[in-house]
Image: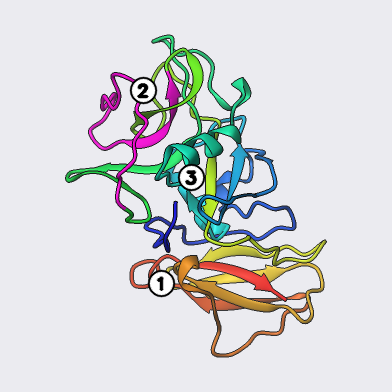
Amino acid sequence: MTGAATILESCRFSIMRTCPLVLPAVLLTSLPVLADPVLFPGTGHYYEAVKVPAGITRHQAAQAAAAKGGYLATISSQAENTFVYSLVNDLSWFTNLSINNDRLGPWLGGISTSSGWQWNTGETFSYTNWKPGQPDSYAGFYQFLQFYNGADIGSTWGDHPGNAIAGYDLPRGFVIEYDQAPGTFVPTGVRLDINKEGTNQVMLTWPADATGWTLEYTTNPSLGWQTFPTTPTISNGRFRVPDSVTVDPVRLYRLRQ
């Protein structure tokens, strides 16, 4: 969707790897399948489809998108919807048939709130493409948006409570939107590991040499990244940083050259 994005969902810790996807630790066992981000000229934004064959919750998908510097895709026109769906237009992106004989598609960025539907960026929910009968608030009042076309695959939408539902597989993927071309921040062979220590600090470690790279953090990737007041030495070492669970906003970390 056009316009600057304010990400409303994020994660406290992220692990930066050399592969295109940067995921919170909770997702590292899900074996995501990646595709390169693709530019949609209609918005000037880039979109990346991420397949997670084992299934993924809406919260985990939002965390993964934020950790990469993007957000779950928001859609403001039929042309944009057609383009985004083209990235996942295959049965492998949809779940097996449920107990109700329907399939769930990849996550998008819509959220149902007490005041109605909105995008996770705060943008106006002006365009819709609901499957007839949707949204139906099945299995919960607060719902999230996904591609849904009943027993078939398709570009129409449905709502979902976000977590596991009895008789249903978890959705198998999500689509990330970026306001600009995403970059690669970690060199080959270098991994930034992030582990919580106590209640007010985290330990960052990098097992391979990353001399010349800068350690940065942010609470919102769309608002930019910051360096630490005391720049650590990024070379075969470790670095403790304050990160209070109860005081600080959620925070993401990365290495950048």
Viewer-proximal residue among 90 and 160: 90
The amino acid type found where label 1 is placed reads Ser
Towards the viewer: 159 or 124: 124
Read off the residue under disc 1: 244
Query: Residue at point 82% right, 73% down?
Result: 209
Q: SS class of the residue under badge 3?
A: helix
Residue 147 sits above or below residue 152 on the image: below
Nearest to viewer (mark 1 / mark 3)? 3
> The C terminus appears in which quarter of the rendering?
bottom right
Q: Is residue 65 magenta?
A: no
Q: Amino acid at mark 2?
A: Lys
Stretch in magenta: 124-149
Q: Marks 1 and 2, Cα distance to the nearest angstrom?
A: 43 Å
Q: Main secondary structure of the magenta part?
A: loop
Which numbered dot is residue 72? none
Task: Please state which amino acid type lies under the numbered disc 3.
Answer: Gln
Where residue 31 appears, as percent x and y from the top left, is: 67, 38
Question: Which circle's residue, 1 or 2, is located before the other in the chain?
Answer: 2
Q: Which residue is mark 3?
A: 60
Observer-nearest of 2 and 98: 2
Query: Upstream in the sequence, badge 3 or badge 2?
Result: 3
Snapshot quadrant of residue 142: top left
- Reading the image, the residue beneath label 2 is 131
Residue ID at (54%, 33%): 85
Question: Judging from the image, what secondary structure is the residue with disc 1 in?
Answer: loop
Marks 1 and 3, how far apart in space? 21 Å
Which comes before the other along the chain, label 1 or label 3? 3
Q: Quadrant of residue 68?
A: bottom right
Query: Where does residue 87 sit, x and y in percent of width and height?
Result: 61, 36
Residue 134 painted magenta: yes
Whole-number angstrom distance, CA of label 3 to CA of label 2: 25 Å
Assign a secondary structure to mark 2.
loop
